[in-house]
Structures are given as C-alpha cells and as structure tokens.
Image (tube, rainbow, N blue to C red):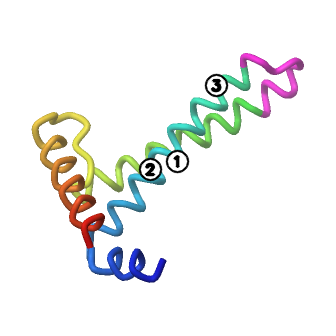
Amino acid sequence: MNQLIQNLMGMGGMTDQVIATDFLISAKAGVRNYAVAITEAGTPELKSALREQLNTAIATHEKITNFMIARGFYHPHNLSEQLQVDLNVSETALKLAQK
C-alpha cells in the first residue's frame, strides 16, 4: 500500500485528473441509477424526490465536466485530443504498475 501511495504522489498534476475522472464516472453512474429508480418508483412522491436528486446529479456531472474541460483533462468535442489524453493516462498507469 505504501508503494502505491508513493507512486501516486509522484504523479504530480495527474492526481487531480485521476480524482476528477473517478468523480465524473461516479456522477454518471448516479445519473443512470436515479433515472432507473424513477422508472421503478411506486408513488408520485417518491418519483418527485428522485427527480430532484436526478437534477442535482446532472448538475454535479456538468460541474465536474466543466472543471475537467477547463483544465484540459477532458475533451468531449475533440476525439483526437481526448485520445491523446487517454493514451497519456494509460502510459502513466502502466509505468505505475511496473514500479
């Protein structure tokens, strides 16, 4: 475990990108889960409460996305730039695994 922490600390700015990416993935999962839960809800009150949570989850996803775009971590409208970011992250992950 200590080796993993030392490796992550050596990532510098990549740590922010890793955390933001994980947060974005979690936010996407939350949006999906709330949408499914709304279709399964049995009462109008529960559906309403879940819709409020869904709206909050969508807003959170948007904030994280904007944060990542502003810092160059995420390029949803430019596939070649996003591919380069993904390749860099993959290369870093492989180097960490080899240490």
| Three-letter amino acid code of the residue under disc 3 | Ala
Q: Nearer the viewer, residue 56 or 33?
A: 33
| Three-letter amino acid code of the residue under disc 1 | Thr
Q: CA distance from mark 1 to mark 2?
A: 5 Å
Q: CA distance from mark 3 to mark 1?
A: 15 Å
- Taking the spot 24% from the left edge, 59% from the top edge, the residue there is 94
Horizontally, residue 83 falls left or right of residue 99, namely left
Reading the image, the residue beneath label 1 is 60
- Taking the spot 64% from the left edge, 25% from the top edge, the residue there is 35
Horizontally, residue 3 falls left or right of residue 56, namely left
Looking at the magenta stretch, what is its main secondary structure?
helix
Residue at the farthest front position:
98
Mark 2 nearby-residue class (10 Å; few <14, some 14–19, many ≥20): few
The image position of residue 64, as x and y in percent, is 42, 51
Mark 3 nearby-residue class (10 Å; few <14, some 14–19, many ≥20): some
Q: Nearer the viewer, residue 83 or 6?
A: 6
- Taking the spot 84% from the left edge, 28% from the top edge, the residue there is 46
Q: Is residue 45 above or below residue 92?
A: above
Reading the image, the residue beneath label 2 is 63
Q: Is residue 68 above or below residue 15?
A: above
Reading the image, the residue beneath label 3 is 35
Q: Are marks 1 and 2 in contact (CB under 8 Å)?
A: yes
Query: Magenta stretch?
Result: 39-49
The image position of residue 17, as x and y in percent, is 32, 61
